[in-house]
Amino acid sequence: MSVVQSNFLNFKNIRHAFSIRSGGVSPYPWNSLNCSFFVGDKENNVIRNKKKILNKLGFENDFFIKQVHGNRIVDAEDFIDSKEIVEADGIICKTYDLPISITTADCAPILMADPINNIIGAAHAGWRGSLSGVIDNLIDKFRTNGSNLENIYTVIGPCISKESLEVKSDMIEHAVRKDKASHDFFSNISNCYFFNLSGYLKNRMEKNGLKNIYCLSEDTYNNPDKFFSYRYETKNNNFITGRMINIISLTSEKKNKKFLASS
């Protein structure tokens, strides 16, 4: 079972992973490691796929949300004992051994950690959520919970690249109305417009005072055998595809010892 990880989040009390699309049980068009309950795949397939990732990291369950391309951030602790399907696009957590996750297939997965104050966060950031402030709101949640900006480490995971995210002029107009600075992240190549999603997100993080930011620079669109890419599939007249899971957790010393012993 392969996953993508970053040494930038290599802290003793934190475990994380960005999944790829292979190694699961889902049939076409979700083939094969689909980890979203909200794209039409059978529930049992998703449960089995997620367990593969969770078990690799030494966990049994995770807290997840139904993403809506907005900017709401929720506290995982508020819903630990709830069966409610929570609509949001970001999560913050201070509970040990409670992995939090978001799913993506071109949008940017953001994993964030404060290893000093033991706080983790995750966000789903497409162009709509990015422009409406999902990252700003996640950083605000960290601040509210006592984080100092210099202690926050952030990784932008596999997402669609600036060479692949073609947009229309009305999207540019909408973006500039929301944030004038977004103008700098559009480019015109052969009379086609493209948006640098990860570059824009990094810029917003820096404007919020973050300094510890790393971008994995893996393009989902140009690697359809490795990653799910909604845009790649729709370009090829396939309107259903799976989602990768992007997961992070605070890990207790007991859980770490058990995990290392079984590895």
Image: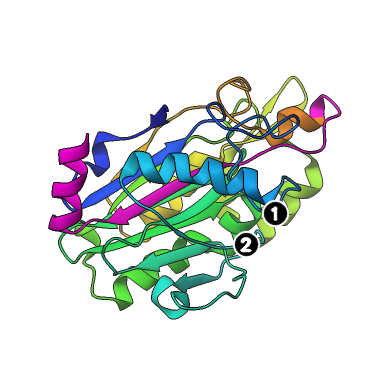
Which image quarter is the N terminus in? top left
* Relative horizontal placement of residue 144, taking residue 238 as reference (left or right): left
* Relative horizontal placement of residue 171, taking residue 201 as reference (left or right): right
Q: Which mark is residue 263?
A: none
Tell me what residue is drawn at x 62 percent, y 59 percent: 67
- Foreground: 33 or 213? 33
Which residue carries the number 1 mark? 38
Percent of width and height locating residue 246: 46, 45
Mark 1 Cα within 10 Å, few/some/many (few <14, many 20+)? Answer: few
* Relative horizontal placement of residue 169, taking residue 251 as reference (left or right): right
Whether 175 is drawn above or below 57: the answer is below
- Foreground: 15 or 121? 15
Tell me what residue is drawn at x 41 percent, y 31 percent: 3
The range drawn in magenta is: 235-263
Q: Earlier in the sequence, mark 1 or mark 2?
A: 1
Instruction: Place residue 175 in its image quadrant.
Output: bottom right
Dot 2 falls on a residue whose secondary structure is loop
Percent of width and height locating residue 35: 58, 45
Mark 2 Cα within 10 Å, few/some/many (few <14, many 20+)? Answer: some
Q: Is residue 91 magenta?
A: no
Q: Which mark is residue 66?
A: 2
Q: Is residue 243 magenta?
A: yes
**Three-letter amino acid code at the position of disc 1:** Phe
Tell whether label 2 touches label 1 (CB within 8 Å). Answer: yes
Tell me what residue is drawn at x 50 percent, y 63 percent: 90
**Three-letter amino acid code at the position of disc 2:** Lys
Number of marks in the rendered image: 2
Which image quarter is the C terminus in? top left
Dot 1 falls on a residue whose secondary structure is loop
